[in-house]
Amino acid sequence: MGKYGWSLPVAASSYAGKIDFGIWLIHAAMLGIFVLWGTFFVYLLVKFRARPGHNAVREDHDDTPARISVPDSISKFPFAQMLYKNKGELKSLIPDMVIMTFEVALIVFYAIPVWSSIKASVPEVKDPIRVEIVSEQFGWNIHYAGPDGKLGPRKMELTHFSNPIGLDVAHADSADDVVMGNEMRLPVDRTVVIDLLSKDVIHSFFIPEFRLKQDAVPGLNIPMWVTPTKTGKFEITCAQLCGFAHSLMRGDVHVQTQEEFDAWYKSRLATIPASAQPTNPAEEF
Protein backbone atom coordinates (compact mmCIF):
# COMPACT_ATOMS: atom_id res chain seq x y z
CA MET A 1 0.00 0.00 0.00
CA GLY A 2 3.09 2.20 0.30
CA LYS A 3 2.48 5.78 1.34
CA TYR A 4 -1.25 5.47 0.67
CA GLY A 5 -2.92 3.97 3.72
CA TRP A 6 -6.51 3.87 4.86
CA SER A 7 -6.54 7.56 5.62
CA LEU A 8 -5.80 10.54 3.39
CA PRO A 9 -2.34 10.91 1.86
CA VAL A 10 0.07 13.27 3.57
CA ALA A 11 -0.92 16.91 3.07
CA ALA A 12 1.94 18.54 1.15
CA SER A 13 0.56 21.82 -0.20
CA SER A 14 -0.65 25.09 1.27
CA TYR A 15 -4.33 24.33 0.59
CA ALA A 16 -4.38 20.57 1.24
CA GLY A 17 -5.43 21.19 4.87
CA LYS A 18 -8.52 23.16 3.79
CA ILE A 19 -9.69 20.32 1.54
CA ASP A 20 -8.96 17.72 4.21
CA PHE A 21 -10.99 19.67 6.79
CA GLY A 22 -14.01 19.62 4.48
CA ILE A 23 -13.65 15.87 3.88
CA TRP A 24 -13.33 15.10 7.60
CA LEU A 25 -16.24 17.42 8.45
CA ILE A 26 -18.55 15.67 5.97
CA HIS A 27 -17.53 12.22 7.22
CA ALA A 28 -18.02 13.28 10.86
CA ALA A 29 -21.49 14.58 10.00
CA MET A 30 -22.38 11.33 8.20
CA LEU A 31 -21.15 9.33 11.18
CA GLY A 32 -23.24 11.45 13.55
CA ILE A 33 -26.34 11.01 11.37
CA PHE A 34 -25.74 7.27 11.16
CA VAL A 35 -25.44 6.96 14.95
CA LEU A 36 -28.59 9.04 15.59
CA TRP A 37 -30.73 7.18 13.08
CA GLY A 38 -29.34 3.82 14.16
CA THR A 39 -30.12 4.60 17.80
CA PHE A 40 -33.63 5.70 16.87
CA PHE A 41 -34.32 2.55 14.86
CA VAL A 42 -33.06 0.31 17.68
CA TYR A 43 -35.30 2.21 20.12
CA LEU A 44 -38.32 1.60 17.88
CA LEU A 45 -37.48 -2.08 17.50
CA VAL A 46 -37.23 -2.54 21.26
CA LYS A 47 -40.22 -0.40 22.27
CA PHE A 48 -42.66 -1.82 19.74
CA ARG A 49 -41.41 -5.39 19.68
CA ALA A 50 -43.93 -8.23 19.84
CA ARG A 51 -44.29 -9.50 23.39
CA PRO A 52 -47.01 -10.94 25.65
CA GLY A 53 -49.66 -8.40 26.61
CA HIS A 54 -48.92 -6.00 23.76
CA ASN A 55 -50.99 -6.35 20.64
CA ALA A 56 -50.57 -4.47 17.41
CA VAL A 57 -53.13 -1.68 17.06
CA ARG A 58 -54.37 -0.68 13.67
CA GLU A 59 -54.23 3.10 13.15
CA ASP A 60 -57.26 4.89 11.79
CA HIS A 61 -56.34 7.12 8.86
CA ASP A 62 -59.74 8.69 8.45
CA ASP A 63 -58.36 12.06 9.56
CA THR A 64 -57.11 12.90 6.11
CA PRO A 65 -56.08 16.52 5.47
CA ALA A 66 -59.34 17.11 3.57
CA ARG A 67 -61.42 16.21 6.66
CA ILE A 68 -59.40 18.19 9.21
CA SER A 69 -61.20 21.36 10.25
CA VAL A 70 -59.07 24.48 10.47
CA PRO A 71 -59.48 27.37 12.98
CA ASP A 72 -61.48 30.37 11.78
CA SER A 73 -58.41 32.60 12.12
CA ILE A 74 -56.68 30.90 9.19
CA SER A 75 -59.67 29.76 7.18
CA LYS A 76 -59.18 32.61 4.69
CA PHE A 77 -55.57 31.75 3.91
CA PRO A 78 -55.21 28.71 1.62
CA PHE A 79 -51.47 28.25 2.22
CA ALA A 80 -51.94 28.44 6.02
CA GLN A 81 -54.76 25.90 5.74
CA MET A 82 -52.51 23.51 3.86
CA LEU A 83 -49.78 23.82 6.52
CA TYR A 84 -52.27 23.29 9.33
CA LYS A 85 -53.82 20.20 7.76
CA ASN A 86 -50.40 18.68 7.08
CA LYS A 87 -48.67 19.70 10.32
CA GLY A 88 -48.20 16.09 11.31
CA GLU A 89 -46.35 15.24 8.12
CA LEU A 90 -44.37 18.50 8.30
CA LYS A 91 -43.05 17.61 11.76
CA SER A 92 -41.61 14.41 10.32
CA LEU A 93 -39.56 16.53 7.90
CA ILE A 94 -37.73 18.40 10.67
CA PRO A 95 -34.69 16.03 10.68
CA ASP A 96 -34.44 16.29 6.90
CA MET A 97 -34.65 20.09 7.07
CA VAL A 98 -31.88 20.19 9.69
CA ILE A 99 -29.62 18.06 7.49
CA MET A 100 -30.43 20.09 4.38
CA THR A 101 -29.68 23.34 6.25
CA PHE A 102 -26.33 21.94 7.36
CA GLU A 103 -25.45 20.87 3.83
CA VAL A 104 -26.44 24.23 2.31
CA ALA A 105 -24.44 26.08 4.99
CA LEU A 106 -21.44 23.83 4.32
CA ILE A 107 -21.60 24.62 0.60
CA VAL A 108 -22.20 28.37 0.97
CA PHE A 109 -19.89 29.18 3.88
CA TYR A 110 -17.09 26.63 3.35
CA ALA A 111 -17.00 24.76 0.05
CA ILE A 112 -17.54 27.72 -2.30
CA PRO A 113 -15.01 30.06 -0.56
CA VAL A 114 -12.35 27.31 -0.46
CA TRP A 115 -13.02 26.27 -4.07
CA SER A 116 -12.88 29.91 -5.15
CA SER A 117 -9.55 30.53 -3.41
CA ILE A 118 -8.01 27.46 -5.07
CA LYS A 119 -9.62 27.35 -8.50
CA ALA A 120 -11.12 30.72 -9.41
CA SER A 121 -7.96 32.81 -9.28
CA VAL A 122 -4.20 32.53 -9.11
CA PRO A 123 -2.71 34.35 -6.10
CA GLU A 124 -0.49 37.31 -6.79
CA VAL A 125 2.92 36.29 -5.53
CA LYS A 126 6.34 37.72 -6.19
CA ASP A 127 8.57 35.71 -8.52
CA PRO A 128 6.52 32.50 -8.95
CA ILE A 129 7.84 29.44 -10.78
CA ARG A 130 6.23 29.36 -14.22
CA VAL A 131 5.51 25.96 -15.70
CA GLU A 132 3.50 24.74 -18.65
CA ILE A 133 2.26 21.15 -18.61
CA VAL A 134 1.36 19.73 -22.00
CA SER A 135 -0.30 16.34 -21.70
CA GLU A 136 -0.52 13.73 -24.42
CA GLN A 137 -1.25 10.05 -24.88
CA PHE A 138 0.53 8.87 -22.81
CA GLY A 139 2.70 11.29 -20.87
CA TRP A 140 3.21 14.66 -19.25
CA ASN A 141 5.56 17.22 -20.79
CA ILE A 142 6.78 19.70 -18.19
CA HIS A 143 7.91 22.97 -19.78
CA TYR A 144 9.91 25.39 -17.59
CA ALA A 145 10.62 28.97 -18.49
CA GLY A 146 14.31 29.80 -18.78
CA PRO A 147 16.20 32.44 -16.75
CA ASP A 148 14.41 35.10 -18.80
CA GLY A 149 11.16 34.04 -17.09
CA LYS A 150 9.38 33.63 -20.43
CA LEU A 151 7.90 30.45 -21.83
CA GLY A 152 8.88 30.05 -25.45
CA PRO A 153 6.06 29.82 -28.00
CA ARG A 154 4.87 26.50 -29.36
CA LYS A 155 3.66 25.60 -32.82
CA MET A 156 1.69 22.49 -33.59
CA GLU A 157 3.49 21.96 -36.91
CA LEU A 158 6.80 21.69 -35.03
CA THR A 159 5.60 18.79 -32.89
CA HIS A 160 7.89 15.81 -33.25
CA PHE A 161 9.03 12.91 -31.09
CA SER A 162 12.23 14.92 -30.42
CA ASN A 163 10.17 18.07 -29.74
CA PRO A 164 6.97 16.77 -28.10
CA ILE A 165 5.48 20.17 -27.28
CA GLY A 166 6.32 21.80 -30.62
CA LEU A 167 8.61 24.37 -29.02
CA ASP A 168 9.68 27.05 -31.50
CA VAL A 169 13.40 26.84 -30.77
CA ALA A 170 14.15 29.60 -33.27
CA HIS A 171 12.38 32.08 -30.99
CA ALA A 172 14.55 33.99 -28.51
CA ASP A 173 12.24 33.12 -25.57
CA SER A 174 12.69 29.38 -26.20
CA ALA A 175 16.47 29.15 -26.21
CA ASP A 176 16.78 28.72 -22.44
CA ASP A 177 13.61 26.71 -21.79
CA VAL A 178 13.73 23.31 -20.08
CA VAL A 179 11.39 20.47 -21.08
CA MET A 180 11.02 17.32 -18.99
CA GLY A 181 8.98 14.17 -19.51
CA ASN A 182 6.97 12.74 -16.60
CA GLU A 183 9.28 14.42 -14.12
CA MET A 184 8.64 17.67 -12.31
CA ARG A 185 10.90 19.51 -9.90
CA LEU A 186 9.71 22.24 -7.56
CA PRO A 187 11.24 24.21 -4.69
CA VAL A 188 9.47 23.92 -1.35
CA ASP A 189 7.39 26.83 -0.02
CA ARG A 190 7.39 28.61 -3.37
CA THR A 191 4.29 29.06 -5.47
CA VAL A 192 4.25 27.53 -8.94
CA VAL A 193 1.84 28.89 -11.56
CA ILE A 194 0.89 26.25 -14.11
CA ASP A 195 -0.76 26.39 -17.52
CA LEU A 196 -2.36 23.00 -18.17
CA LEU A 197 -2.96 21.90 -21.76
CA SER A 198 -3.62 18.71 -23.72
CA LYS A 199 -2.48 17.75 -27.20
CA ASP A 200 -5.04 15.02 -27.74
CA VAL A 201 -7.68 13.54 -25.43
CA ILE A 202 -8.93 14.62 -22.01
CA HIS A 203 -6.50 13.80 -19.22
CA SER A 204 -6.66 14.61 -15.52
CA PHE A 205 -3.52 15.91 -13.85
CA PHE A 206 -3.48 14.60 -10.28
CA ILE A 207 -1.01 14.88 -7.42
CA PRO A 208 -2.81 13.37 -4.39
CA GLU A 209 -0.46 14.82 -1.75
CA PHE A 210 -1.02 18.33 -3.10
CA ARG A 211 -4.82 17.76 -3.39
CA LEU A 212 -4.26 19.12 -6.89
CA LYS A 213 -6.49 17.66 -9.58
CA GLN A 214 -7.52 19.27 -12.82
CA ASP A 215 -8.73 18.02 -16.18
CA ALA A 216 -6.61 18.89 -19.20
CA VAL A 217 -8.82 19.53 -22.22
CA PRO A 218 -7.62 19.89 -25.83
CA GLY A 219 -7.95 23.49 -26.99
CA LEU A 220 -8.06 24.95 -23.48
CA ASN A 221 -5.32 26.58 -21.43
CA ILE A 222 -6.36 25.97 -17.82
CA PRO A 223 -4.46 27.88 -15.12
CA MET A 224 -3.77 26.30 -11.75
CA TRP A 225 -1.36 26.86 -8.92
CA VAL A 226 0.13 25.17 -5.91
CA THR A 227 2.60 25.93 -3.13
CA PRO A 228 4.38 22.73 -1.98
CA THR A 229 5.03 22.68 1.76
CA LYS A 230 6.94 19.41 2.19
CA THR A 231 10.06 18.08 0.51
CA GLY A 232 10.00 14.59 -0.99
CA LYS A 233 8.94 12.65 -4.06
CA PHE A 234 5.23 12.48 -4.85
CA GLU A 235 3.32 10.74 -7.58
CA ILE A 236 1.86 12.38 -10.66
CA THR A 237 -0.91 10.40 -12.28
CA CYS A 238 -3.69 10.72 -14.82
CA ALA A 239 -7.07 10.35 -13.11
CA GLN A 240 -8.86 9.83 -16.43
CA LEU A 241 -8.88 6.41 -18.05
CA CYS A 242 -7.49 7.83 -21.28
CA GLY A 243 -6.49 4.72 -23.21
CA PHE A 244 -4.77 1.35 -23.22
CA ALA A 245 -1.43 2.79 -22.03
CA HIS A 246 -2.99 5.04 -19.39
CA SER A 247 -0.64 3.63 -16.76
CA LEU A 248 2.36 5.09 -18.59
CA MET A 249 1.25 8.54 -17.43
CA ARG A 250 2.63 7.89 -13.99
CA GLY A 251 5.31 10.45 -13.14
CA ASP A 252 7.01 12.02 -10.16
CA VAL A 253 7.22 15.47 -8.69
CA HIS A 254 10.33 16.11 -6.62
CA VAL A 255 9.93 18.88 -4.05
CA GLN A 256 13.36 20.12 -3.04
CA THR A 257 14.98 22.91 -1.11
CA GLN A 258 15.59 26.07 -3.11
CA GLU A 259 19.31 25.28 -3.25
CA GLU A 260 18.71 21.76 -4.56
CA PHE A 261 16.22 23.05 -7.12
CA ASP A 262 18.63 25.74 -8.32
CA ALA A 263 21.39 23.15 -8.73
CA TRP A 264 19.08 20.88 -10.75
CA TYR A 265 17.86 23.79 -12.86
CA LYS A 266 21.40 24.87 -13.70
CA SER A 267 22.32 21.30 -14.59
CA ARG A 268 19.43 21.15 -17.05
CA LEU A 269 20.38 24.48 -18.58
CA ALA A 270 23.89 23.18 -19.08
CA THR A 271 22.59 20.34 -21.25
CA ILE A 272 21.00 22.62 -23.86
CA PRO A 273 23.85 24.37 -25.69
CA ALA A 274 22.75 26.39 -28.69
CA SER A 275 24.40 23.98 -31.12
CA ALA A 276 22.37 21.12 -29.66
CA GLN A 277 19.01 22.77 -30.22
CA PRO A 278 16.87 20.68 -32.55
CA THR A 279 16.24 22.01 -36.00
CA ASN A 280 12.76 22.26 -37.36
CA PRO A 281 11.62 18.67 -36.85
CA ALA A 282 8.69 19.05 -39.21
CA GLU A 283 11.17 19.39 -42.05
CA GLU A 284 13.07 16.30 -40.92
CA PHE A 285 10.03 14.13 -40.68
Image (cartoon, rainbow, N blue to C red):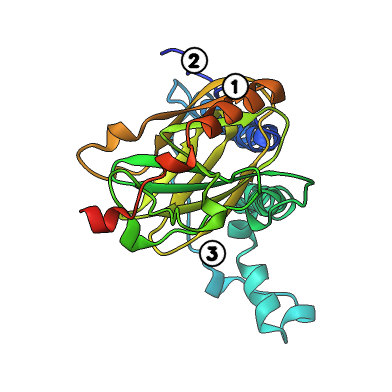
Badge number at residue 63: 3
Above or below residue 214? Residue 181 is: above
Three-letter amino acid code at disc 1? Val
The residue lying at 66 percent from left, 27 percent from top is 262
User: Identity of the amino acid at label 2?
Assistant: Lys
Residue 97: image location, x then y, percent: 65, 53
Exactly how many numbered labels are in the figure? 3
In space, the residues marked 3 and 1 are separated at their CA atoms by 59 Å
Characterize the local packing of mark 2: few (<14), some (14-19) or many (20 or more) Cα atoms within 10 angstroms: few
Q: Residue at x 52, y 25 (%)?
A: 42
Q: Quadrant of the N terminus?
A: top left
**Residue denoted by label 2:** 3
**Figure quadrant of residue 91:** bottom right
Q: Is residue 11 visible?
A: no
Q: Vertical placement of 157 versus 23: above or below?
A: below
The residue most toward the front is 275
- Front position among marks 3 and 1: 1
Q: Name the amino acid type tagged 3.
A: Asp
Q: Residues within 10 Å of mark 3 (few under 14, many from 20)?
A: few
Mark nearer the N terminus (1 vs 2): 2
Query: Can you identify the residue that label 1 sits on?
Result: 10
- What secondary structure is found at the residue carrying circle 1? loop
**Cα separation between marks 3 and 2:** 62 Å
Image marks 1 and 2: residues in contact by CB distance under 8 Å: yes
Q: Nearer the viewer, mark 3 or mark 2?
A: 2
Q: Quadrant of residue 218?
A: bottom left
